[in-house]
């Protein structure tokens, strides 16, 4: 699979939201307020506001390939697609067409691959993986990956990271105050406890 | 907006200070408490600590504090003067636009320079092809002001084996050890090096009426809602406003300094919050807009009398830009470090500070351990895993779940040689939203800076090995195109041909114009410039007060 970006410039650019090409990056500023307002208004299980249901199903399937729901919750259970729906309805509105085009390209390849499926979401998971492996260097995939990570790990107010499932996976405990010891090694060094923090 | 005093724009105030950051905040407080009337023009908004949040998407990715990555304030970057500069998606000169400036969002590492940083050129000799020079000041002259920074700004720390002389102890003890610091100590011990508590402008205990840090972990890039980070927003600005002599005027973007028939600055032209053009008259002006915006404004203030830009008879405005050299490596450990808690950096190693003739390059630096870009979840997910990790799928998820609490970075920060070709200039084509020429950054690290970065990275890796890392990977050592350290672009000196300001921060060309911020530095130091910028600001205020008293402005 594709390696992570290598250069210092690249990883800073990636961090700035520019990974995966301009369609995602161009209108990033402003996402916060608009997305938050929309995200807060949505109850869990509500219908999509901006995504066509079939596009949402495809994006959800791609996100599930990126962060699978296996022995622990992944992108689907964390509601990543709702984050995407929120974002695409606000500052990414101008990019929705580009995303739809990317999905259409992908679905054309789905049809070529499997006559029984007409959409990515309808492919069996092994074939989904195979297809994405061929697409993983594309701007489209990079953009969806970036949105998936944001949807998995941003504040739940944005619509994803439901019940802190994303934060739980990586071990991030969001509190406003901590006291030392913070971790195993400082606890050991300062003789505070046995490192079980 | 402040509820305090308002000065009319058409009557000259004693001082207009441009920029409210590390230097501007100090100067405002010092001059206002001496009874001078001061207007501070700040291009960013006036946010209160209660408005700061842990919203990573907004603060880091939406650049809430740096004005956004959109077309409003574009910058261009190029490596060499012969190239056409391209728009940088992420600003090449990265700084916060807000009251308090970058002192609000920085990580607050506060290292003093040492005596050798001021006279290294004399000690080591010239380095051909560079502007390597001594300062017109000595460490001894600046020391009282470093101590002022310690006590008035609020610095936590404890003496280390290589520290320069200090006239007073730290006001508060060092911040509690983190696992990154404990591992750095372990590694240093095995290698015969010396890890010492990191001096930081974050309070370990209450001081000057402000509370101690609550270790929330959102320092780098974020504002401190606890008011424990010693930004000028938390420390200096409230004192300045309390005098009744200081007006902080936010959302005021200065675009030109106007001079009168005597060649003195008379009017500071700016766009107000609504984008309308305004002018604030001043008896004297202090430019403290940072090492990028300060030279940009001087260059944009050209006139028939000053055709190459204001204060630029030397031609050195914008030149000798220095970023500090940087390198980093990363490691995983068996047990949890939880580097997302508390401040960035609790231990530093200064064994490699001095330039060593046994090495075949000039330079020295300091090593520290910290979460760096992986202190927050999304940043971590994008950057924090080893490069051989799959980027999606079950293996990616497994790596994602294991790395956040078990990783650290070790950084080498060090000298940059001053090169005249590294600069801030006006882009000849691109304009910002006000129609001003965009800021253009030209930067290519000197080969010695890159050699130093590689050398320090090797030491970082050795430390990780000695500390028992289970996996280690290096970040590339390469020319830097993004920085938060903006130094040297209006350097101070005694020779008007070779410098922009004199030893008292007064322009060689314009008697009532003072310039004090990162642009004043003659050498880069070893990596953390803010403390020196603030010591210079306290000293400049003393000198300016003196001149004013003697009617010498």
Image: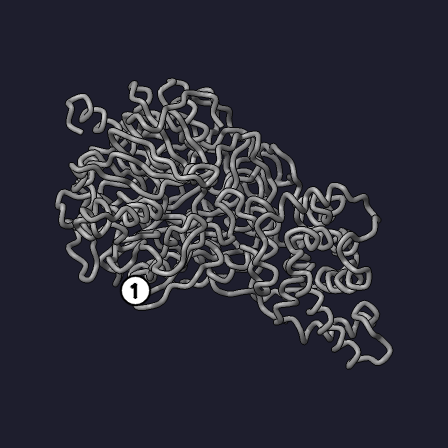
Q: The C terminus of chain A is located in which quarter? A: top right
Q: Nearer the viewer, residue B86 or B320?
A: B86
Q: Quadrant of the N terminus of chain A?
A: bottom right
- Residue at horizontal 81 percent and vertical 43 percent from the top: A43
B512 sits left or right of A145 in the view: left
* Residue pictured at 47% horizontal, 57% vertical: B329
Where in the figure is residue B204, as x and y percent of width and height?
48, 29
Vertical relation: B400 (above or below) B174: below
**In the displayed structure, would residue B367 be above or below residue B16?**
below
Give the camera-side residue of B151 and A49: A49
Q: Is residue B394 above or below residue B219?
A: below
Question: Which residue lies at the image location 43% right of the left edge and 52% below the top edge?
Answer: B432
Residue B428 percent coordinates (x, y):
34, 60
User: Can the viewer see residue B110?
Assistant: yes
Q: Position of residue A194 (x, y in %)?
A: 62, 38
Left/right placement of residue B96 relative to residue B538 reads: right
- Decide: is A176 above or below B69: above
Q: Residue furthest right?
A: A116
Pinpoint the chain carrying mark 1.
Answer: B
| Snapshot quadrant of residue A108 | bottom right
Front-most of residues B432 and B484: B432
Residue B549 % position (x, y): 18, 21
The answer to whether residue B526 is visible is no
Mark 1, residue position: B81
Q: Residue at x 63, y 62 (%)?
A: A143
Q: Is residue B326 left or right of residue B114?
A: right
Colouring chosen for the image of the structure: one colour
């Amino acid at each position: 699979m594709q390696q992570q970006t290598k250069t210092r410039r690249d990883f800073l650019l990636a961090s700035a939201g520019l990974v995966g090409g301009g369609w995602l990056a161009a209108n990033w500023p402003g996402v916060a307020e608009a997305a938050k307002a929309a995200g807060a208004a949505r109850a869990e299980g509500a219908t999509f506001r901006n995504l066509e249901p079939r596009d949402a199903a495809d994006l959800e399937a791609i996100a599930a390939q990126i962060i699978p729901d296996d022995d622990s919750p992944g992108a689907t259970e964390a509601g990543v697609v709702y984050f995407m729906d929120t974002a695409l309805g606000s500052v990414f509105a101008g990019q929705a067409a580009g995303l739809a085009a990317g999905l259409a390209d992908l679905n054309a390849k789905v049809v070529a691959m499997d006559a029984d499926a007409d959409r990515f979401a309808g492919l069996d998971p092994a074939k989904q993986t195979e297809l994405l492996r061929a697409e993983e260097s594309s701007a489209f995939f990079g953009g969806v990956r970036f949105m998936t990570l944001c949807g998995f790990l941003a504040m739940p107010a944005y619509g994803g990271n439901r019940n802190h499932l994303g934060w739980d996976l990586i071990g991030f405990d969001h509190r406003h105050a901590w006291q030392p010891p913070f971790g195993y090694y400082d606890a050991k060094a300062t003789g505070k406890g046995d490192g079980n923090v | 907006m402040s509820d305090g005093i308002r000065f009319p724009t058409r009557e000259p105030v004693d001082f207009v200070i441009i920029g409210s950051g590390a230097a501007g905040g100090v100067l405002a407080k010092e001059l206002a408490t001496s009874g001078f009337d001061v207007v501070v023009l700040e291009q960013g908004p006036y946010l209160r600590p209660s408005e700061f949040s842990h919203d990573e998407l907004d603060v880091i990715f939406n650049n809430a504090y740096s004005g956004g990555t959109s077309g409003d304030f574009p910058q261009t970057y190029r490596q060499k003067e012969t190239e056409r500069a391209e728009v940088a998606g992420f600003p090449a000169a990265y700084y916060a636009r807000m009251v308090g400036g970058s002192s609000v969002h920085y990580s607050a590492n506060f290292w003093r320079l040492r005596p050798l940083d001021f006279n290294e050129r004399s000690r080591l000799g010239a380095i051909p092809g560079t502007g390597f020079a001594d300062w017109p000041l000595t460490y001894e002259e600046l020391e009282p002001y470093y101590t002022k920074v310690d006590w008035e700004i609020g610095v936590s720390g404890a003496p280390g084996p290589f520290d320069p002389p200090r006239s007073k102890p730290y006001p508060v003890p060092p911040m509690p050890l983190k696992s990154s610091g404990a591992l750095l100590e372990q590694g240093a011990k095995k290698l015969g090096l010396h890890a010492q508590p990191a001096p930081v402008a974050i309070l370990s205990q209450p001081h000057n009426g402000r509370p101690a840090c609550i270790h929330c972990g959102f320092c780098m890039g974020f504002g401190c809602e606890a008011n424990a980070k010693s930004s000028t927003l938390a420390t200096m600005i409230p004192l300045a406003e309390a005098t009744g002599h200081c007006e902080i005027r936010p959302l005021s973007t200065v675009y030109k300094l106007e001079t009168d028939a005597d060649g003195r600055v008379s009017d500071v032209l700016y766009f107000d919050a609504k984008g309308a053009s305004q002018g604030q008259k001043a008896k004297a002006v202090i430019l403290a807009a940072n090492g990028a915006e300060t030279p940009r404004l001087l260059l944009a203030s050209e006139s028939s009398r000053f055709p190459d830009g204001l204060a630029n008879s030397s031609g050195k405005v914008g030149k000798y830009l220095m970023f500090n050299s940087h390198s980093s490596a990363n490691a995983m450990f068996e047990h949890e470090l939880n580097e997302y808690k508390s401040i960035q950096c609790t231990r530093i190693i200064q064994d490699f500070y001095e330039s060593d003739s046994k090495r075949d390059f000039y330079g020295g630096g300091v090593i520290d351990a910290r979460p760096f870009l992986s202190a927050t979840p999304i940043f971590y997910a994008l950057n924090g895993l080893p490069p051989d990790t799959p980027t999606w799928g079950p293996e990616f998820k497994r790596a994602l779940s294991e790395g956040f609490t078990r990783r650290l970075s070790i950084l080498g920060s060090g000298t940059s040689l001053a090169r005249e070709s590294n600069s801030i200039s006006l882009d000849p084509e691109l304009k910002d939203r006000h129609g001003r020429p965009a800021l253009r950054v030209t930067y290519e690290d000197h080969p010695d800076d890159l050699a130093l970065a590689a050398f320090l990275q090797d030491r970082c890796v050795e430390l990780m090995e000695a500390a028992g890392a289970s996996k280690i990977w290096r970040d590339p050592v390469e020319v830097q195109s993004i920085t938060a350290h903006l130094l040297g672009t209006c350097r101070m000196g005694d020779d008007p041909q070779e410098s922009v300001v004199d030893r008292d921060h007064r322009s060689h060309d314009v008697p009532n114009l003072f310039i004090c911020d990162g642009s004043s530095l003659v050498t880069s130091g070893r990596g953390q410039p803010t403390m020196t910028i603030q010591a210079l600001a306290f000293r400049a205020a003393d000198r300016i007060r003196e001149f004013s008293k003697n009617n010498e402005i």
